[in-house]
Amino acid sequence: MKSKVLIINFVILVTFLLSPAIALTFYKNIKSFYKNEIKNNPLLSHLQKYQIDEIKKMSDISKSIEHQYKSFTSWEPKKIESDLLNIDEFYNTRKSLNEKLNNSNWFFGGSTMYGAGVNDMETIPSNYASITNEKVMNFGTGDWASRQSLNKLINVIGDGFKPKKIIFYDG
């Protein structure tokens, strides 16, 4: 009985000690495979460079955004204009494809709806507009919770604007 317990404990110990090494080897092999695939395919190599450059540029633009305090919703981004990211001054909204304020589909949410890390044409509202060809408005703002989105909705409706549909995607 003691020998079985010792063997089981030994197997568990060896498995526990070797699992990080096995996982690291697996990771290195996968990483090497994808690097070789990109090097051997000029189209993929070009796309990766483009994506890396755009990500760096988006990061720099995002870091440069200033914020201002607004009653009931807290901090909102100030107006910014660039080739990848644009924020309107009126409601501090992110620009979208087929953008229209009145009688359009209004999108509310946090950083995912806002489109953190992607350009204006790759946000959820812009993708929705390109698929449906309907008018949209992106009210998403990074670091927001559902209560802030709801307050923004109340503010916009209180100003006399009316949506066609309202979509919330909050954390």
Image: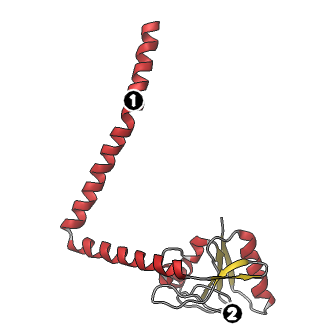
Relative depth, front residue between 30 and 59: 59
Q: Quadrant of the C terminus?
A: bottom right
Q: Which residue is found at the position 39% from the left and 22% from the top?
A: 11
Relative depth, front residue between 163 and 158: 158
Q: Which residue is mark 1?
A: 15
Q: Locate residue 15: give its quadrant.
A: top left
Disc 2 is placed on an element classified as: loop
Q: Residue furthest top?
A: 1
Q: Which residue is found at the position 64% from the left and 70% from the top?
A: 143
Q: Is residue 139 left or right of residue 160?
A: left
Residue 21 location (% of width, % of height) = 34, 39
Residue 18 location (% of width, % of height) = 36, 33
Residue 104 location (% of width, % of height) = 65, 88
Q: Locate residue 67: give its quadrant.
A: bottom right
Q: Which residue is found at the position 25% from the left and 55% from the top?
A: 32
Q: Locate residue 43: give its quadrant.
A: bottom left
Q: Is residue 118 left or right of residue 19?
A: right
Q: Is residue 63 left or right of residue 159?
A: left
- Tell me the number on the disc at residue 102: 2
What is the CA distance from the residue labelled 2 to the residue labelled 1? 62 Å
Residue 148 location (% of width, % of height) = 73, 74
Query: Tag 1: residue type?
Result: Thr
Label 1 neighbour load within 10 Å: few <14, some 14-19, many 20+: few
